[in-house]
Amino acid sequence: MIRQFFPSTLSRYLSRTYILGFLSLFFVLLGIVYLFDTVELYRRAAKFTDVPLSLVLQMGLLKLPEVGQIILPFAVLFSAMMTFWALSRRSELVILRAAGLSAWQFLGPVIGIALLIGAFQITVINPFSALSLSRFETLEKTHLDRSQNLISFSGQGLWLRQSTEDGYVILHAGKVAMPDWALQNTMALFFDEQDLFLRRIDAPKASLEGGQWNFQDAVINTPGKKPARSDFLSLATDLTIPDIEESFSDPQTIPFWRLSRFIEILDATGFDSTPVRIHRQTLLAQPLLLMAMVLLAAAVSLRPQRSGGTTGLIAAGIVIGFMVFLGSSFLQALGASGQLPPLLAAWFAPVIALMLGVGAIMSLEDG
């Protein structure tokens, strides 16, 4: 009876200790990041007289959830190291060992909390972060970049908005042929500064070359006039192919629940969905990565204080954490360039980190 009650009490104690440590460290890191981000945003906003401080503070908050997802593995790693180090310093690990508990038994609650944090990130934090980051980018383009060119993508194809000498034009393409960004089934709607419709151009193809859109076999419809045809028609633009590609290089603005549908739309319209596929697989692998961080933290922290070298062991754990992060980023970059399959690019680093953590704990137990 006592033996059944003790593990349950121990689990609650370890879970509570780790959660408090994790939340404290996580919010401290968020506060530091928010401070630096806000200072940088304020520096950028200082050259405009119509950007108030309240807007800068709001933009910093909107960016914070996305930053939180980046520092989450580090918070899990460092808080686990702090928890295990505290247990060792207070000789509680010696008591647990004397009670006949293995490392896996008192690691279980912390690993379970890490898995729950990963699941919470995927289902709640990521969708909220995607919405807030999308709002942040809109405010950034409007108030800091002062960009008049808007690019959006939906199931109906590609939509572009750019300024012209007498107003603006909205360009729509039903499909895009990659990698040259040749627009197909193109429509251009011209408006003046008072939003009055001027004319419409329809063309089966359009391409972006030399600072202008080139329409082939275009049909021009102007109110009050008969339709006119043109074999070649050009429209000046300050957009470039990198500008357009940059608008689709941030899958972080897509909530997790919509990623599968967005991938289908990208494939159907001719866009490269590889970055989005890697992002989705990376999110799915996040609980495994957080579990690996806990095991790596335990491998360098579950040692009696008399064995010495605590500072070096903790430093080694920090180095391991950054190596996992850099390795994961490197593999994702290889996947985005097409050199690795998305599944391998997203899952390889967490699996290797998990295997290293399991091997280190098994070695520690045998020792």
Image (cartoon, rainbow, N blue to C red):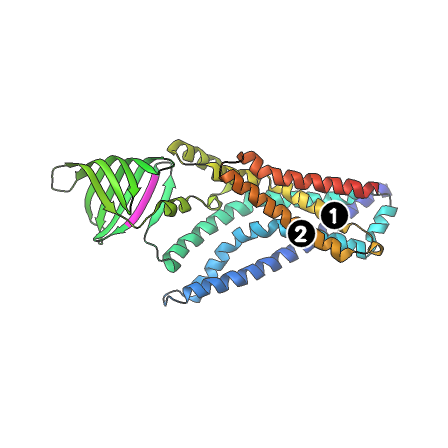
Q: Main secondary structure of the magenta part?
A: strand
Quarter placement of the N terminus? top right
Q: Is residue 84 above or below residue 232?
A: below
Q: Residue 125: x, y in percent? A: 55, 47
Q: Work out which residue is located at the far left of the displayed protein and give it.
A: 225
Q: Residue at x 44, y 33 (%)?
A: 264
Q: Residues within 10 Å of mark 2 (few under 14, many from 20)?
A: few
Q: Residues within 10 Å of mark 1 (few under 14, many from 20)?
A: many
- Please indicate whether residue 158 sits to the left or right of residue 38 in the image: left
Image quadrant assignment for residue 120:
top right
Q: Secondary structure at mark 2?
A: helix
Q: Which mark is residue 319?
A: 2
Q: Residue at x 73, y 45 (%)?
A: 109
Q: Which residue is mark 1?
A: 298
Q: Which residues are magenta?
A: 158-162
What is the CA distance from the residue labelled 2 to the residue labelled 1?
14 Å
Residue 263 counted in the magenta span: no
Residue 160 counted in the magenta span: yes
Amino acid residing under circle 2: Val
